[in-house]
Amino acid sequence: MTDRTDITIAAINGKTPRIDPTAFIAPGCRIVGDVEIGPDVSIWYNCVIRADVNRIVIGARTNIQDGSVVHCDSPKPGRPDGYPTLIGEDVLIGHMAMVHGCTLANRAFVGLGTVVMDGCTIESDGMLAAGAMLTPGKTIGAGQMWMGRPAKFARDLSEDEKAAHRAGVAGYVENGKRHAGALGAGA
């Protein structure tokens, strides 16, 4: 399949997405506005990355899995810069996640079906467990796992769990290359 009309990459407000040529963008994705996508990133089927009111940065080797939505928060009184969405390197974002106006440090893990709200931070090797909701302004510390709705600290992650997350990142880089080849998309 070489027809890429199944992906929307659109400028808005004079800002055009900047996508590294090694990134895999799956069919059905919508990428709009002030978005920067780094090398070996994989954005999986039917994701929306919409930076129409602020910016979104996605670091190298990060993957955003099927059906996820990434947005940002606009400037407001008392918050003149709003909240951009800043996603570091080697981040895993599970299927159907909602990531909005937050910071995900290198190696953060966002489980499937989660919600990360405005002003939140997940520090390096921090994890938001599947189905959890991180309410505005909360911070998951380095190496911590939080769970529940609203999310609360559950425990520290083991070194084996952190290693498994790193292996997952490498697996998604390779899987993205396989999908790109199968779809005739380059990358």
Image (cartoon, rainbow, N blue to C red):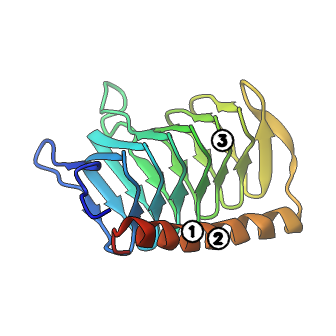
Comes first in the chain, label 3 or label 2: 3
Comes first in the chain, label 1 or label 3: 3
> Residue 26: which quarter of the image?
bottom left
Asked if the residues shown at circle 2 and circle 1 are in contact, with their CB atoms under 8 angstroms apart, the answer is yes
When the figure is inspected, residue 148 is found, relative to residue 6, above or below; the finding is above
Residue corresponding to mark 2: 171
Residue placed furthest toward the front: 1
How packed mark 2 is, by other alpha carbons closer than 10 Å (few <14, some 14-19, many 20 or more), is few
> At 18% from the left edge and 54% from the top edge, which residue is drawn?
16
When the figure is inspected, residue 131 is found, relative to residue 158, above or below; the finding is above
Residue 157 percent across, percent down from the top left: 85, 56
Residue 165 percent across, percent down from the top left: 73, 63
Which structural element holds mark 2? helix
How far apart are the alpha carbons under marks 1 and 3? Answer: 18 Å
How far apart are the alpha carbons under marks 2 and 1? Answer: 6 Å
Amino acid type of disc 1? Asn
Residue 11: image tag: none
Amino acid type of disc 3? Leu
Which structural element holds mark 3? loop
Residue 175: image tag: 1
> At 71% from the left edge and 60% from the top edge, which residue is drawn?
125
When the figure is inspected, residue 10 is found, relative to residue 115, above or below; the finding is below
Question: In terms of depth relative to the viewer, which is nearer, 76 or 56?
Answer: 56
Residue 112: image tag: 3
When the figure is inspected, residue 39 is found, relative to residue 34, above or below; the finding is below
> Residue 53: which quarter of the image?
top left
Quarter the C terminus occupies: bottom left
Quarter the N terminus occupies: bottom left
Position of 156 with respect to 179 (left or right) is right
Position of 33 with respect to 175 (left or right) is left
